[in-house]
Image (cartoon, rainbow, N blue to C red):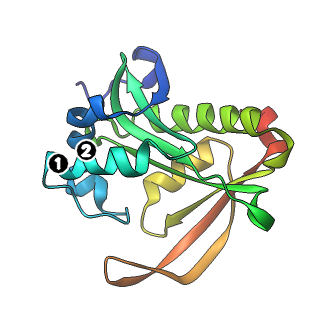
Amino acid sequence: MDPELKIENLPQITLRPLGVADVDDFMVWAMDARVARFCTWEPYTSREDGLNYIQNTVVPHPWFKAICLNGRPIGAISVTENSGGDACRGELGYVLASEYWGKGITTTAVKMAVKAVFEERGEKLERVEALVDVDNVGSQRVLEKAGFCREGLLRRYVVLKGRTRDMVMFSLLSTDVGIL
């Protein structure tokens, strides 16, 4: 794919449930060390592990979608559904095959996902937040372009792959959705 190709030149980006039939497409990004660098998981090494993850984690998840280009998954996006005192917020996560980085696809998918999840969950969801590793500048830029507010730095917030990491907190409120 031409590295200069931007999202406006690409076919429509869609979101849909990710299922076991998508395992081969899933493995493209799940096996890529560049994609997994800032994720909680290590690169997948077997199709069976990918199938198990999709069956046991993705399928039962309340809001987990494939990011599709021409109907083919090239990434995934999810928003948690919390309960009790945390029901007012959901945490956003996303991943995209590295060959599609820098084309505006993730920003588009984030905008679509946030709009959909606020509509689907109604008044009970007031905030979507995302925690991003301080060194993951690309992901921070995605959230800024999608209208998220950078709230601050959480120092030594999480242990990721054996190292304590600083994280940046971003949020978008349901009252902000008009900017999408």
- Mark 2 lies on residue: 51
Mark count: 2
What x and y, as percent, mark residue 19? 36, 33
In the image: residue 112, left or right of residue 3: right
- Mark 1 crowd level (few <14, some 14–19, many ≥20, 10 Å Cα): few
Contact (Cβ within 8 Å) of mark 1 with mark 2: yes
Front residue of this view, candidates 53 and 37: 53
Q: In which quadrant of the rendered image does the C terminus lie?
A: top right
User: On the picture, is 155 further left or further right than 171?
Assistant: left
Q: Amino acid at mark 2?
A: Leu
* Secondary structure of the residue carrying numbered label 2: helix
**Image disc number at residue 124:** none
What x and y, as percent, mark residue 114? 65, 39
Spatial distance from mark 1 to mark 2, Cα to Cα? Answer: 5 Å
The residue under label 1 is 48
Label 1 SS: helix
